[in-house]
Image (spheres, rainbow, N blue to C red):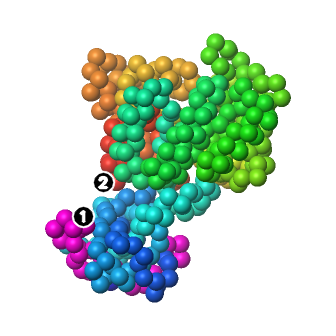
Amino acid sequence: MESGRADWSGAGCLVNFARISDWSNPVWRRSKTEACPLRAAVFTVIPAALPGVSPRFRIASTISLHPESAQSRNLTGGNTCCNANIRRVDVRRPLKNVAPLVATPVFPELLTDKVMRLSEVFSSQPFAVSIEIFPPKTAEGDAALRKHMEALVEHQPAFMSCTYGAGGSTRDRTLHWCRDIQENFKRTAMAHFTCVGSSKEELLEWLDQAADAGIHNIMALRGDPPQGETEFQPAVGGLNYANELVELIRGHKHDFGIGVAGYPEKHLEAPDEDVDLANLKRKVDAGADAVFTQLFFDNASFFRFRDRCQQAGIRVPIVPGIMPITDFARIKRITSMCGTLFPESLSNRLEAVQDDSDAQFEIGVEYAIAQCEELRNSGAPGIHFYALNKSQACQKILEALSA
């Protein structure tokens, strides 16, 4: 391994970097003799195989090398950084006493084209962070969400998803935001899609539109009844269940990645856990690539659910869904609608500060960090954050996980 110095994007300061001559990783290496094609290559310095540290999610420091640098002319590698072990490397300081380092070039012009399907996401990294947003209703909301997304993408989520809206009310806006995620924020997108209010022909038409928009991943949901209705009623010529929607998507000419919902504490409409699990198994058997769970606050519920899925023969990734608590009143409304259990000890802490929004935020973030750390350490394939179109809580959680 060699180390050297190079200009930091013309900023006038010097940075330390590392290069390794043996590009033995078949996932990320390109031709060892291939010259770097960029005017200024961006390198991500990540520790590899640190003793006692298990692989986590992608986190690293980046440096830019001018083409005049001899090292930058000869150092080549894959087009995106692979998963880093959790340890931040300050490239502005000498790299001392660190296990073998890999300097991985990041080619920005290729990120636009590299949209991954869910199966690729979870096969290429051991811990994939994803973030869910919903389409705002106003231009002001759009502008605010973009500001929050700018902050969130700094943490390089594996993908971002956008909801479909009650009764399919935001179906066009969903595709708009998914295009924005991929074209402007350079992240893979997953579009939510439901059966509500659409015939089979209309569902197929929407899938054609999604494919034309460059969307490669769909979150397939039956969907909730439209506002004012208490029971789900299929549209004329439509579908009744999510597994039917998965089957429809899987049969489409475009090879979509497909996510489905799972319920650690049972879907409200399911009579018992066994029926609920059988419904999930049908969705997976129909072609789902991953299961994303409803929010929960008791990790034991997730671990029991994951064990039961394995016993039922469900072999796709089971991804826990986490909603950081930032407003106690709001989270109580959400949990009352979806049937999520709320730990009494956490409820008591939040009740005690119900008039202090800052304290609620701090308690909620602290709790979510502990949840995520336990989930990650227990082998969860990733975490799907329900961000509610805000960035502050997820930022703090991801910073804590990368420390």
Mark 1 element type: loop
Q: How far separated are the C-alphas under marks 2 and 1?
A: 12 Å
- Can you identify the residue that label 2 sits on? 403
Q: Residue at x 37, y 58 (%)?
A: 59
Q: Is residue 5 magenta?
A: yes
Measured as percent of width and height from the top left, residue 237 is found at 83, 29
Q: Is residue 192 in sight in this rendering?
A: yes
Measured as percent of width and height from the top left, residue 194 is found at 67, 33
Mark 2 element type: loop
Measured as percent of width and height from the top left, residue 157 is found at 45, 51
Q: From this viewpoint, which residue is outermost toward the bottom?
A: 33
Q: Which residue is drawn at 32% across and 49% down?
A: 399
Question: Closer to the camera: disc 2 or disc 1?
Answer: 1
What amino acid type should be assigned to the residue bearing mark 2? Ala
**Mark 2 and 1 residues: CB-CB less than 8 Å, in contact?**
no
Q: In this view, does 298 lie above or below 342?
A: below
In the rendered image, which quarter contains the N terminus? bottom left
Q: Is residue 340 left or right of residue 194?
A: left
Q: In this view, does 289 lie above or below 279?
A: below
What amino acid type should be assigned to the residue bearing mark 1? Asp
- The residue stretch that appears in magenta: 3-28
Q: From this viewpoint, which residue is outermost toward the right?
A: 237
Q: Which residue is drawn at 35% across and 45% down?
A: 151
Measured as percent of width and height from the top left, residue 48 is found at 39, 71
Q: Residue at x 77, y 25 (%)?
A: 234
- The numbered dot on residue 90 is 1
In the rendered image, which quarter contains the C terminus? bottom left
Q: From this viewpoint, which residue is outermost toward the left?
A: 12
